[in-house]
Amino acid sequence: MTNDRDHRIDFFRGLALIFIFWDHIPQNPLAQLTVRNFGFSDAAEIFVFLAGYAAALAYGRIALRDGYLVACVRILRRAWVLYVVHIFLLVLLMGIVFVANSHVETRDMIQEMGLYYFLSNPQQALIDELLLRFKPNLMDPLPLYILLLLGLPLVLPLMLRRAEYVVGLSVALYLLAPLLQWNLAAQEGGVWFFNPLAWQLLFVLGGAAAMRGQRASRVDQRPLLRQPLFSLAAVYLLVTGLIALSWKWPQVHDALMPKVLAQWLYPISKTNLSPVRLLHFLALAYCTAKLLPSGPWLQHWLARQACRMGRYSLEVFCFGVLLAPLADMANALADEGLGMQVFSALVGVGLMVVLAAWLDLNKRLNRPAQVMPV
């Protein structure tokens, strides 16, 4: 494995964090600009795929350098950190929502965040929290990532040698999960919103892409429009984008969508990562990689801020989870005015950028000073 870092991974992780933050602020006008409005997938697919890419790359290097056992210990230690962060983040989120709800009279934010379960049965909710079964709104991605990371040691040795075998097994599990209705239990008899037995495929595909990226491969020199796979992916993105845009006008959608196609297409399950969602993300990732190779554009100031956010994705994600209900409260207190909605969304992103910059500076300051030779 080489040590060259593809900064596009950091950039798109940072962009996904912005999209996740905007998508979780109710009635946020900037959420109309996120990827979910232009196709079947959204920022969750970006986040999970790139998490798999980064995890396989990082721990694969450790396994090759220090051995498989060391890599496993590092993975388990990271998963434990994520678990502890999840517990504290949920406590902080509940505190913020309870305080915000006491100031907002027009809406019930506790109901919207799914926190009445804690108020009605706190003892069982605490147990479910420790078992990763109690996941209010905004909290689903972190438990999913914890489980996917815990599963990485099971496939890492084979992924380093024959990633295609791991992908094959992952596809089989992905197909069996909805067919046999496999999922993990959540609170009150429910199931996980992100079925880890289905979403593991995206994580594995990210890892396989990382392994492939470390090997030299022949680059297709033909113009993009003459590459069949790119053309097919671009057509799929165009068609699905038009369908997604038509959802904003239900009458137009119902008039233009053939009933046979609608019966086959809907519902588009996010829980089980519907195949059309998966194909949309893969087409989007492929076309983006082709259209935006690494280059000078990553040195632009805005791109560098997104890259920095992507490098500290855990901290920035958690901060965004806490900022979303605060932005919602500010909007509600301002009577959902358009100016305040845009302002709160932009200020939240600005604070996330500041946090990433502070973490980057703190990391540099903590590096041991190099002693100059006398």
Image (spheres, rainbow, N blue to C red):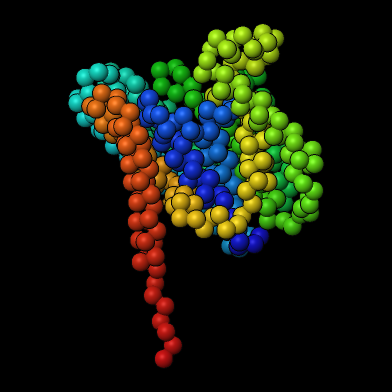
Residue 55 falls left or right of residue 221: left
Question: What is the x, y in percent for residue 1?
Answer: 66, 60
Question: What is the x, y in percent for residue 288?
Answer: 63, 43
| Residue 373 or residue 59, whichever sits in front | 373
Q: Residue furthest left?
A: 103
Question: What is the x, y in percent for residue 120?
Answer: 28, 18
Q: Residue at x 60, y 53 (%)?
A: 57
Label total for image: 0
**Residue 16 visible, this orientation:** yes
Quarter holding the C terminus is: bottom left
**Residue 329 visible, this orientation:** no
Compared with 242, 74 (above or below) is below
| Residue 302 or residue 67, whichever sits in front | 302
Q: Residue at x 77, y 46 (%)?
A: 223
Compared with 197, 57 (above or below) is below
Compared with 284, 182 (above or below) is above
Dividing the picture into quarters, in which one does residue 283 lie?
top right
Residue 366 falls left or right of residue 171: left
Residue 332 falls left or right of residue 356: left
Q: Residue at x 62, y 34 (%)?
A: 281
Question: What is the x, y in percent for residue 176?
Answer: 66, 24
Q: Residue at x 79, y 38 (%)?
A: 228
| Residue 71 or residue 226, whichever sits in front | 226
Residue 109 falls left or right of residue 212: left
Q: Residue furthest bottom?
A: 374
